[in-house]
Amino acid sequence: MIVTASPRLPRMTVDGPLSLAASRLPAAERRIFARYRANALLVGSIPSTEAVLLALEPLLLNPLTLWHPAESLTLPERGGTLVLRNVGRLSPVAQAALVDWFNHDAYQTRVISTSPSPIYSLIERGRFSDALYYRLNTVYVELRDE
C-alpha cells in the first residue's frame, strides 16, 4: 500500500515540566498547527501531553472527536479534529481501520495523537502499523519532564 504524506515539518522538543495551569506552546509551534492543519504525535508523560492538548484546544477544529484506549474507536464523519490518547494501545484491527479511514477522509481531518513513549519501538516489534505511524507523525513533539 502506498501512503501519501504531507511534507515533513520540523521536529519540536519542549523542554522542562509543563503544568496543566501554565502550559504554553511557543508561538512558532502554534503557527505550524494553525497554518498547516498538520497531524501531530505528542510523546511524553500523560500530564505533559494532556497539558499540550489543553494549550492546543483553541486551535482544534470542530467537530472534536476524542478517543481513549478504554473506548471503541469511533471515527469522525465530518472532518474537524480527532484526538487519539495513548495511540500505541490501538488494537491491530483499529489501526487497520484508521489507515483505511485516512485513505478515504475527504475532509482532511486533523489528527492529534499522544503516547507516553515513542511508537517506533512498537513498529520494530510488529505491534504498530508503520503506515499509520507515518500518517500520524507529520509533526513530532517530544515533551521532556524534568
Image (cartoon, rainbow, N blue to C red):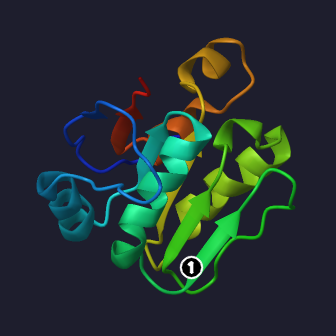
Q: Is residue 3 visible?
A: no
Rendered residue at 56%/87% (across/down): 78
Q: Return the x and y of residue 121 as percentages of the image width and height.
A: 60, 15
Question: In the image, is 85 to the left or to the right of 72?
Answer: left
Question: In the image, is 63 to the left or to the right of 58?
Answer: right
Residue 63 vertical position relative to residue 138 in the rendered view, above or below: below
Residue 140 vertical position relative to residue 36 in the rendered view, above or below: above
Q: Quadrant of residue 47?
A: top right
Residue that mark 1 sits on: 64
Question: In the image, is 129 to the left or to the right of 27?
Answer: right
Give the quadrant of the N terminus: top right
Q: Quadrant of residue 56?
A: bottom left
Give the quadrant of the C terminus: top left
Q: Return the x and y of residue 63 as percentages of the image width and height.
A: 54, 86
Residue 121 vertical position relative to residue 28 in the rendered view, above or below: above
Quick one: label 1, few (<14), some, or many (20+) residues within 10 Å?
Answer: some
At mark 1, the secondary structure is strand
Q: Is residue 133 visible?
A: yes
Residue 1 vertical position relative to residue 32 in the rendered view, above or below: above
Q: Return the x and y of residue 136 as percentages of the image width and height.
A: 48, 46
Q: Which amino acid is tagged 1?
A: Leu
Rendered residue at 54%/21% (across/down): 120
* Foreground pick, 127 / 89: 89
Q: Residue furthest left?
A: 28
Rendered residue at 57%/30% (across/down): 130
Rendered residue at 40%/55% (across/down): 39
Question: In the image, is 30 to the left or to the right of 38?
Answer: left
* Foreground pick, 40 / 52: 52
